Image (cartoon, grey):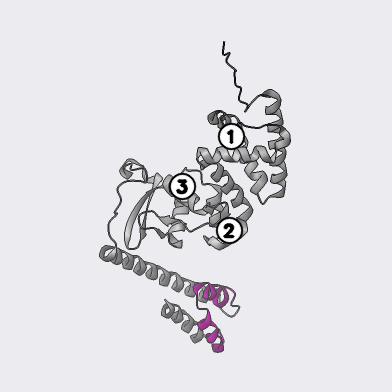
C-alpha cells in the first residue's frame, strides 16, 4: 500500500509542485488522508487538471487495493476458516429457525460462529455488569463456545448488526460502544451508573433466603418504622409483602449517587411506615392457650 501512494508522491515531485524535503514527513505518517488533503486539495501550486488527475490515481489505487484485499480474504477463508461449529443458540433452539436479521455469523479463532442476537445482548450485559459482592468488575464479553473474549473487530460487527436489526439495544451496550469497547475506560466513565444497575441485578437474581435476610436487615436499619418479624413467621408472606421495596433499600445503602440514595431512603421509610399503619400486626406470632380442663 505504501508503494502505491509513493507513486503518487513521486508524480507530485516530478511536476515540481512540492518541496522534496517534505518527503521525510510522509515517512512518519504516510496515509491517504494526508496526501489527499495536504498535498493535493490544499496545494495552491497545483492546477485543477493536475488535482483531478492525482485524485483519479488515488481512486484507482484504492479500488485495486481493496479488490486484492477482498481476494486475499476469500482465499484465506477457504484455506483456514472452519465451517460453523454451532447449529443451536444458547437456549438449544435451532439457529436455522431465526431470520437472517436476528442472527449474526462472525469469525473467531479461524472458525465461524453463528449467534442469535438476543443471546449476544445477554452475554454482553452479564459481562459488563459483572461484580463481586457489588464491587464492579466488568469484563470483556466472551464467546461462550471458546471462553475467549470477542475481538474488538467483532464487537463492532455485533454492535452494527444490532443497529440494523429491530432489537432494542440496552443503554449499557451503547455506553460500551461510546467507550470504544475499552473495558477500563467504560468502567471509569460509567462507574456510578454501573453500580446502580449491579444493585438491581443483584437484588433481582438473589435466592429467596438471601432476599429474606436482607429484608430482616432492612427492618433493623429502619427499626423506627416499628416492623419486626418473628423467626417463625411465614417467610413467603414476608417476601411477597416487603420484597418489592428491597431494590430501593439497596440503592439507599450501596449506590454512589447521593441524590438517588436520599430519594430511595425516603421512599423506603414512607413505604414501611404506610405498611405498618395498614398492617399493624404483621410479622407477629400468636399462641392460643389450650385449657387443661
* Residue 243: numbered disc: 1
Which quarter of the rendering shows the N terminus?
bottom left
* Residue displayed at 71% across by 32% down: 226
Query: Could you tell me how far apart the alpha carbons at marks 3 and 2 are, in whole angstroms?
Result: 18 Å
Could you tell me if the residues under marks 3 and 2 are in contact, i.e. CB atoms within 8 Å? no
Is residue 17 in sight in this rendering? no
Magenta-highlighted residues: 18-43
* Residue displayed at 57% across by 40% down: 213
Q: Tag 1, which secondary structure?
A: helix
Question: Is 55 above or below relative to 13?
Answer: above
Tell which of 184 and 158 is nearer to you: 184
**Disc 2 or 1, which lies upstream in sequence?**
2
Q: Nearer the viewer, mark 2 or mark 1?
A: 1
Tell which of 79 and 247 is nearer to you: 247
Q: Which residue is mark 3?
A: 122
Main SS category, magenta section:
helix
Q: Is residue 110 left or right of residue 222?
A: left
Q: Is residue 108 left or right of residue 186?
A: left
Percent x, y for residue 18? 56, 84
- In the displayed image of the protein, which residue is found farthest to the left? 79
Query: Could you tell me how far apart the alpha carbons at marks 3 and 1 are, in whole angstroms?
Result: 25 Å
* Residue displayed at 58% across by 62% down: 185
Percent x, y for residue 28? 52, 82
Q: Which residue is mark 2?
A: 187
Q: Tag 2, which secondary structure?
A: helix
Which quarter of the rendering shows the C terminus?
top right
Is residue 198 in sight in this rendering? yes
Q: Tag 3, which secondary structure?
A: helix
Amino acid at each position: 500500500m505504501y508503494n502505491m501512494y509513493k507513486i503518487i508522491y513521486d508524480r507530485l515531485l516530478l511536476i515540481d509542485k512540492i518541496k522534496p524535503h517534505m518527503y521525510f514527513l510522509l515517512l512518519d505518517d504516510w496515509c491517504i488522508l494526508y496526501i489527499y488533503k495536504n498535498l493535493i486539495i490544499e496545494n495552491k501550486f497545483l492546477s485543477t487538471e493536475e488535482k483531478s488527475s492525482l485524485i483519479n490515481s488515488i481512486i484507482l489505487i484504492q479500488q485495486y487495493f481493496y479488490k486484492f484485499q477482498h481476494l486475499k480474504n476469500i482465499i484465506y477463508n477457504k484455506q483456514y476458516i472452519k465451517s460453523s461449529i454451532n447449529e443451536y443458540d444458547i437456549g438449544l433452539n435451532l439457529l436455522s429457525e431465526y431470520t437472517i436479521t436476528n442472527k449474526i455469523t462472525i469469525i473467531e479463532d479461524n472458525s465461524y460462529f453463528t449467534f442469535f442476537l438476543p443471546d449476544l445482548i445477554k452475554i454482553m450485559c452479564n459481562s459488563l455488569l459483572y461484580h463481586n459482592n457489588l464491587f464492579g468488575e466488568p469484563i470483556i464479553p466472551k464467546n461462550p463456545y471458546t471462553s475467549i473474549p470477542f475481538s474488538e473487530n467483532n464487537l463492532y460487527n455485533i454492535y452494527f448488526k444490532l443497529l440494523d436489526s429491530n432489537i432494542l439495544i440496552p443503554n449499557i451496550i451503547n455506553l460500551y460502544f461510546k467507550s470504544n469497547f475499552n473495558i477500563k475506560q467504560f468502567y471509569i466513565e460509567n462507574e456510578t451508573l454501573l453500580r446502580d444497575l449491579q444493585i438491581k441485578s443483584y437484588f433481582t437474581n438473589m435466592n429467596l433466603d438471601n432476599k429474606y435476610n436482607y429484608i430482616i436487615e432492612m427492618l433493623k436499619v429502619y427499626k423506627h418504622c416499628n416492623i419486626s418479624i418473628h423467626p417463625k413467621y411465614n417467610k413467603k408472606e414476608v417476601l411477597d409483602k416487603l420484597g418489592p421495596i428491597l431494590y430501593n433499600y439497596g440503592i439507599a445503602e450501596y449506590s454512589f449517587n447521593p441524590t438517588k440514595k436520599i430519594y430511595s431512603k425516603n421512599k423506603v421509610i414512607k413505604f414501611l411506615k404506610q405498611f405498618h399503619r395498614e398492617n399493624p400486626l404483621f410479622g407477629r406470632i400468636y399462641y392460643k392457650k389450650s385449657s387443661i380442663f
